[in-house]
Image: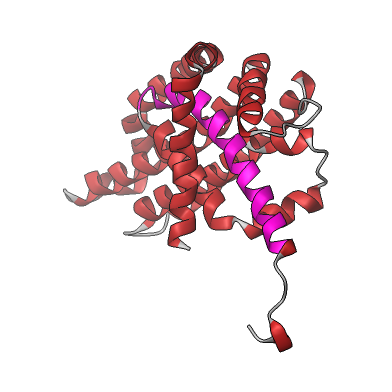
Amino acid sequence: MIGEFFAGVRMLLRGFGTWRQRPGLMALGLVPAVIAGLLLAAALVPLALSLGVISDTVTPFADRWLEPWRSLLRGAVGLVVFVAALALASAVFSALALAIGDPFYQRIWRAVETDLGDPPATDGGGFWSAVGEGIRLVLLGLLVAVVVLLVGLVPLVGGVLGAVIGVTLSGRLLARELTGRAFDARDLTPLDRAALFSGSRARVLGFGVATQLCFLVPGGAVAVMPAAVAGSTMLARSMMQRQRATATTPPPPDGRV
């Protein structure tokens, strides 16, 4: 389980390795990420500056509390609100970047598939497919943000627990979204994809959590997006190879395990 989780983390690191092989192509992948990042920053910066006002507004009952309890409560509320906003922002950023940069990311995906050998004959998805997937990703990201907000209301541990759940759920969403192109190009059905994800849960989680944590670093989402596209292609290939290897493994004699 732990080994599989870190195998997923290594997939993202291998994605960064694509910079050495195709620096010009990866640099092009920064363009849509910069655009999406600037659009989101225009919303997140004012939110961060307003956290104190928001916390005071939603906790009027704490006005008569003694310090430091009032400040601790409102600080925790502000943290939860911002973590929820980051969870939603991660989904919105990915949706925007993938829609805006579909031609760039398609070239990165195709290059990685070619380098790995035996690439699919057709390209996965297209602009309108990316838009549709982006809308779905934003809606799921909104659901994650609501979950984080609700968990954050749990006394004492809500702030930390909400942050962990937010990173975990957002990471899973990212991993599933970014591997979609490789699966689309191979015409895999939803049932086929569900089987792949079921067989590599820890690996998918490791890749997604590593990517999401990078996204939380200021400017990290922009810098990481091309590597995440490359790494997710490798992740998808590893999931399919693993399934084929499992399917061809002969059963033990006499039914023993």
Question: From which residue to which does the magenta span run?
Answer: 218-247
The part of the image, by quadrant, that contains residue 71 is top left
Relative to 180, say whether 76 is above or below: below
Of the pair 127 and 184, the residue shown nearer to us: 184
Q: Position of residue 173 (x, y in %)?
A: 59, 42
Q: Main secondary structure of the magenta part?
A: helix
Position of residue 36 measured from the top left corner of the image (x, y, whole percent): 53, 17
- Image x and y of residue 234, in percent: 58, 38
Q: Horizontal placement of 146 versus 125: left or right?
A: left
Q: Can the viewer see residue 149? A: no
Q: Is residue 21 left or right of residue 201?
A: left
x then y, percent, for residue 27: 49, 13
Asked whether 221 falls inside the magenta stretch, the response is: yes
Tell me, what colour scheme is on the image?
A: secondary structure
Q: Is residue 138 left or right of residue 62?
A: right
Q: Residue at x 53, y 52 (%)?
A: 203
Quarter occupied by residue 58: top left
Q: Is residue 27 above or below residue 221?
A: above
**Is residue 78 in view from this perspective?**
yes
Q: Nearer the viewer, residue 227 or 243?
A: 243
Placement of 177 over or under 227, stated as above or below: below
Q: Tally the marks.
A: 0
Q: Is residue 136 left or right of residue 6?
A: right
Is 176 in the magenta?
A: no
Which residue is rendered at x = 68% and y = 29% of the image? 134
Q: Residue at x 63, y 83 (%)?
A: 257
Q: Residue at x 36, y 27 (%)?
A: 48
